[in-house]
Amino acid sequence: MPEAVGVAITETARRLREIIDEHGPDAVSLYVSAPAVRERVPARRPGRSTAVSGPAGR
């Protein structure tokens, strides 16, 4: 791990600990999500349907 990343993680942990110590565990919340990635829709094959999500089934 690059040193700058380690420093950033350590500083973030220190600051979060200060917030939790001062305001309690409900003062911090995390949001985790998969990155938005444009997915390629597989080509349709004759005789097979391909489910596509999105506006108007496009």
Image: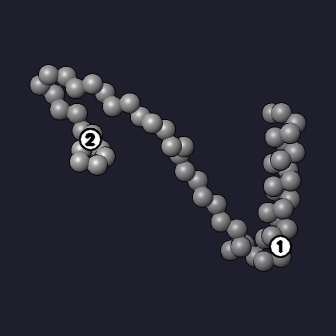
- N-term mark: 2 or 1: 1
* Residues marked 2 and 1 touching at CB (< 8 Å): no
**Place of residue 2 in the rendered image (x, y in percent of width and height, measured from the top left):** 83, 33
As displayed, is residue 38 above or below residue 46? Answer: below
- Report helix, strand or loop for mark 2: loop
User: Which residue is at a point 45% across and 36% down the rendered structure image?
Assistant: 38
- Report helix, strand or loop for mark 1: helix
| Crowd around label 2: few <14 · some 14–19 · many ≥20 (10 Å) | few
| Crowd around label 1: few <14 · some 14–19 · many ≥20 (10 Å) | few
Q: Quadrant of the N terminus?
A: top right
User: Which residue is at a point 71% across and 73% down the rendered structure image?
Assistant: 27
**Place of residue 39 in the rendered image (x, y in percent of width and height, measured from the top left):** 41, 34
User: Which residue is at a point 87% across and 45% down the rendered structure image?
Assistant: 7
Quickly name the residue at label 2: 58
Picture quadrant of residue 24: bottom right
- Look at label 1 and name its amino acid: Asp
Mark 2 or mark 1, whichever is nearer to me:
2
Residue that protrudes farthest toward the left in the picture: 47
Quickly name the residue at label 1: 21
Q: Quadrant of the C terminus?
A: top left
**Place of residue 49 in the rendered image (x, y in percent of width and height, measured from the top left):** 17, 32
As displayed, is residue 31 above or below residue 58? Answer: below
- Look at label 2 and name its amino acid: Arg
User: Which residue is at a point 85% across and 68% down the rendered structure image?
Assistant: 18
